[in-house]
């Protein structure tokens, strides 16, 4: 591994095996990097995004895609019907007229071309962008103003994304193509094939596909079970499965320090109550819980021991096991130190939850937590 220095304010690049990787914090770093990569595109742009907002951020990306399509670059977009439900039906017209192709994943309106009642609950929650099969992005940021800076009229949600250069982009490209084909859009078969079952190197793709060996949930369980020193998890909708909770409890008993960071106030009250329903049990078992103050914390990041990091769209909840998700896994000590430093920075803006204080909350709040937790599979 080698660490590449940059100009003063640019996030540093890390060379890990045959790939180059850098952490992008928040929309302030991620959006300019993504727009710059789109501007450099010469052949192909692939975008798979859960939520594209009908706002200044969404329009900036749409206009950039339209410009590249007009210049002859192949542009293909998949957006989720629920995540982008507020988008007008004509929103992508300019891109289609410019020669771009747009597909809606599982429309929620009965008259939508991709509407299937049996699959309406399965959403495409991925946030990936691939440029010329050379540069890729994967993380938790949607293309909406919530992630933009205050100066740009945004809310500065706290989130993480990765910019990637190298063979890992072939895995992202193959993942996009597989979804595109399943949606029955005519497309040539990709030249590269997914390596999800047998990852090579120290940077690889994880998905929510239970049939794949490199499944995000199972990777979490394996890594937690093998942890020896420290587990740090930032996740906004932390309602983990029984398997993950048991693995965390066993880790604490082995002497592993486990720290979990969640928002102090989530964007969905029902989900926040479900998250808080587990606080008592987690705290009893020795897990440290930190509530991030300020703007909404939306990161889905984990650092385990000294070298493993994963960042992506996967929420540690039941819903993510059914949705389409994408995380990047990285095995590298220098990069893990860099991401952990970012985690520590966020902890400085967080309040640690005390078990005695937590148990003093009133009965009405407890009742809301019980109900929300019982409904966790129906969000």
Image (cartoon, grey):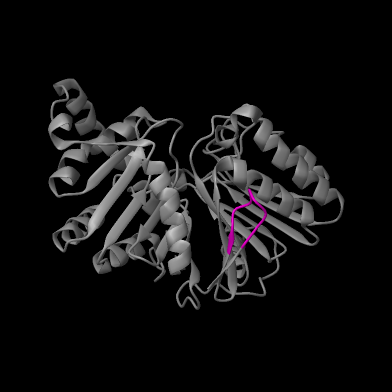
The answer to which quarter of the image holds residue 292 is top left
Give the camera-side residue of 232 and 37.
Answer: 232
- The answer to whether 345 appears left or right of 359 in the picture is right
Image height of 135 relative to 322, above or below: below
The answer to which quarter of the image holds residue 183 is bottom right
Q: Position of residue 21 (x, y in %)?
A: 57, 63
Can see residue 40? yes
Verify whether residue 52 appears in magenta. Answer: no
Magenta segment = 5-13
Mostly what secondary structure, the magenta segment? loop
Q: Position of residue 19 (x, y in %)?
A: 59, 71
Name the residue at the right extreme.
71
Give the camera-side residue of 89 and 49.
Answer: 49
Q: Residue at x 48, y 73 (%)?
A: 202
Verify whether residue 11 appears in magenta. Answer: yes
The answer to which quarter of the image holds residue 281 is top left
- The answer to whether 354 appears left or right of 295 in the picture is left
Image height of 93 relative to 183, above or below: above
- The answer to whether 70 appears left or right of 24 in the picture is right
Q: Residue at x 67, y 50 (%)?
A: 33
- The answer to whether 343 appears left or right of 256 in the picture is right
Q: How many marks?
A: 0
Give the camera-side residue of 71 and 307.
Answer: 307
Can see residue 240? no
Give the camera-side residue of 275 and 344.
Answer: 344
Name the residue at the front extreme.
8
Q: Position of residue 82 (x, y in %)?
A: 52, 38
Q: Position of residue 169 (x, y in %)?
A: 61, 66
Q: Residue at x 63, y 70 (%)?
A: 166
Q: Classify the position of the C terminus by image quarter.
A: top left
């Amino acid at each position: 591994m080698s660490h590449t220095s940059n100009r003063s304010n640019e996030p540093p690049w890390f060379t890990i095996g045959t790939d180059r990787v850098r952490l992008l914090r928040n929309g302030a770093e991620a959006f300019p990097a993504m727009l710059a990569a789109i501007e450099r595109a010469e052949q192909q742009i692939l975008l798979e995004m859960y939520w594209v907002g009908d706002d200044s951020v969404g329009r900036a990306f749409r206009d950039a895609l339209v410009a590249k399509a007009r210049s002859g670059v192949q542009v293909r977009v998949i957006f989720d019907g629920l995540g982008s439900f507020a988008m007008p039906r004509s929103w992508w017209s300019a891109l289609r007229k410019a020669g771009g192709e747009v597909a809606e994943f599982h429309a929620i309106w009965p008259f939508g071309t991709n509407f299937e009642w049996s699959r309406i609950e399965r959403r495409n929650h991925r946030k990936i962008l691939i440029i010329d099969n050379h540069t890729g992005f994967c993380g938790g940021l949607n293309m909406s103003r919530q992630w933009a800076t205050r100066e740009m009229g945004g809310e500065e949600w706290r989130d993480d994304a990765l910019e990637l250069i190298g063979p890992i982009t072939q895995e992202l490209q193959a993942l996009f193509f597989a979804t595109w084909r399943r949606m029955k859009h005519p497309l040539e078969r990709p030249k590269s094939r997914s390596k999800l079952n047998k990852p090579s190197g120290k940077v690889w793709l994880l998905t929510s596909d239970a049939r794949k060996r490199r499944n995000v949930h199972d990777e979490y369980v394996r890594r937690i079970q093998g942890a020896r020193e420290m587990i740090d998890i930032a996740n906004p909708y932390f309602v983990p499965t029984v398997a993950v909770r048991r693995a965390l409890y066993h880790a604490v008993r082995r002497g592993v320090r486990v720290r979990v960071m969640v928002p102090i106030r989530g964007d969905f009250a029902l989900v926040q109550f479900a998250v808080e329903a587990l606080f008592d049990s987690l705290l009893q078992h020795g897990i440290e819980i930190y509530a991030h103050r300020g703007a909404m914390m939306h990161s889905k990041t984990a650092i385990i021991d000294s070298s493993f990091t994963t960042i992506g769209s996967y929420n540690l909840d039941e819903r993510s096991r059914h949705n389409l998700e994408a995380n990047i896994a990285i095995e590298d000590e220098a990069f893990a130190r860099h991401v952990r430093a970012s985690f520590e920075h966020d902890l400085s803006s967080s309040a640690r939850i005390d078990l005695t204080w937590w148990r003093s909350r009133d009965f009405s709040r407890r009742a809301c937590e019980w109900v929300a937790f019982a409904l966790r599979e129906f969000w």
